[in-house]
Image (cartoon, grey):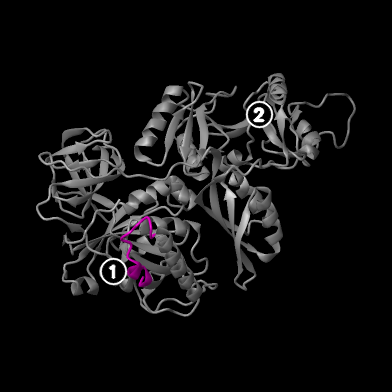
Amino acid sequence: MSVPTTGLLQRTDLRNVAIVAHVDHGKTTLVDAMLWQSGAFGAHDHVDERAMDSGDLEREKGITILAKNTAVEYSGPAAAAAGHPEGVTINVIDTPGHADFGGEVERGLSMVDGVVLLVDASEGPLPQTRFVLRKALAANLPVILVVNKVDRPDARITEVVAEAQDLLLSLASDLSDEVPDLDLDAILDVPVVYASAKAGRASVTQPADGELPDAPDLEPLFSTILERIPAPGYTENAPLQAHVTNLDASPFLGRLALLRIYNGTLRKGQTVAWARRDGSLQNVRISELLRTKALDRVPTDVANPGDIVAVAGIEDITIGETLTDADDPRPLPLITVDDPAISMTIGINTSPLAGREKGSKVTARQVKDRLDRELIGNVSLKVLPTDRPDSWEVQGRGELALAILVEQMRREGFELTVGKPQVVTREIGGKLHEPVERMTIDVPEEYLGAVTQLLAARKGRMENMSNHGTGWVRMEFLVPARGLIGFRTRFLTDTRGTGIASSIAEGYEPWAGPIEFRTTGSLVADRAGVATPFAMLNLQERGSFFIEATSEVYEGQIVGENSRGDDMDVNITKEKKLNNIRSATSESFENVIPPRKLTLEESLEFARDDECVEVTPISVRIRKVILNQNDRSKAVSRSRKA
């Protein structure tokens, strides 16, 4: 959502900018460098790398999940040239690069007046680059192109700049009908900055491939931001309009609403009108007003147009709502995001081992309350009831976003049963349609055939292929979203871990027909007990195991992968019968092959339609939805007759 700024007054001492890019192209590292060079941290401060990625999962996975803001107080030569020798405040929004967290990107873009598009000097624009850039252009935001990692040995700067400009023009032509006032001249004149975020250097002069920029710091980037990103516009004497774009919490102040002020002034202790999502108005008092300074929030008495601040004292406020003048309320439009494409069922743990692995939250009420809390801060999520009172259908942008939610709940002490991810279909013109993804793949040339065959089996269509002459091939496919469930593990196996794949939603197409996800079956425990080395030694020729010897198992638990296509019920608890005959090898179990430990994401990918994943704070197990062997056989017979 953008507010028109033509003919308005401007806050020239302020800039609001979002940094957008594909995963791992260096957004958070660049923000680190901007903070250090602006003097935000003292010489003796201990600040972790990627300071903006504050969550445990963000640090473990190396990706940004939540959009966050920081304030850089810049007082270099460009600030003085702009008439502010005391300095200019640059509010920087660090947005996720993964399309699964697109709701965070859309919220971040609603707070700013321009974007810095970061592109890797070797990889060039990738699907998430297209996604975030399209959102920025749809909001008619000016763009600065930053080519990062120019010092990479395999950098190809000239080609990447050309690819980024082609992408800009392609998106502009696509959006020309949707955005009538799109400034094509500005898109053709996008400034380019060459940077190495890790080295903290940037330049407007293109360096040679693999060399550092000629400037010793990020001054050229700061100068370009001040010159090309417009200052926030506002109407003089207009009533208060402040849009809630994010939520946070403080142990001392309770819920915090992060908002961008478009018009008017907000003061501590002021009574304002809270325009709620249902259209009602309620007068509330601002008990605390906080301004961002570097990575901290500090109290302030007043905030002006263009400022991004946090307020406390409104317990039930949610994203997209407006704080406005109590005497002249003028609510802003609600934030809208794209519809979910993937769903999974989340419910209480119903396995025989429920409540035995340090799970402190095991009831349906606790699970439902936690999902409702997630809805408050996650605008791209939907929670729908199912035919069971203890489980719910959770819809999101992608498999990763839903897996992150389950992982967060697991770490909070929840025990859950999670169903296999499914696509969210829709009916268009009387025909069933399913979401389609545009996938870009980079692989060494020798794996070209294996990858093409893998995606063809999943109904993928190759749209484009290019060879940069480096021994690597880039391919573009259109693939049904359900064809990508479980794809990543097979892809990494087939390319020996060398392939790079990323995808972005491309819209809906007619249902592509059945897709075979797995050519192997499951090894299913046929009784409860403890897995023995003797049984595993005799069964390991049948396939690979997911559990270790001495692990407790129950009937219906999947203990391994069958090398054949059908499921096999196995007795993994069988013990060696004792006798009085001695043998040199009778007690030797060194030949038991170590198990393959699956992560939560890998378990969700592996599960078939009649399987689900048991998640506890300690373990992740795959199991059959129907645990009893006889009941499963009856269900299969009924489905075949139907």
Which of the 4 image quarters holds residue 275?
Answer: top left
Residue 147 higher or lower than 98, as above or below: below
SS under mark 1:
helix
Q: In 3D space, how far apart are the residues under numbered discs 1 and 2 (Cα atoms)?
A: 59 Å
| Dominant secondary structure of the residues highlighted in magenta in the image | loop
* Residue positioned 55% across, 42% down in the render: 434
Assess whether residue 112 is covered by the magenta stretch: no
Q: Please state if 570 lies on the left or on the right of 172 as rendered.
A: right
SS under mark 2:
strand
Residue 363: percent from the left, percent from the top? 46, 22
Residue 33: percent from the left, percent from the top? 36, 64
* Circle 1 or circle 2, nearest the eye: 1
Q: Which residues are magenta?
A: 176-191
Is residue 617 in view?
A: no
Assess whether residue 177 is covered by the magenta stretch: yes
Residue 559 higher or lower than 88, as above or below: above
Q: Which residue is mark 1?
A: 228
* Residue positioned 36% across, 70% down in the render: 190
Q: Which residue is mark 2?
A: 557
Residue type at mark 2? Gln
Residue 305: percent from the left, percent from the top? 17, 54
Q: Please state if 354 lies on the left or on the right of 634 as rendered.
A: left
Residue 540: percent from the left, percent from the top? 78, 38
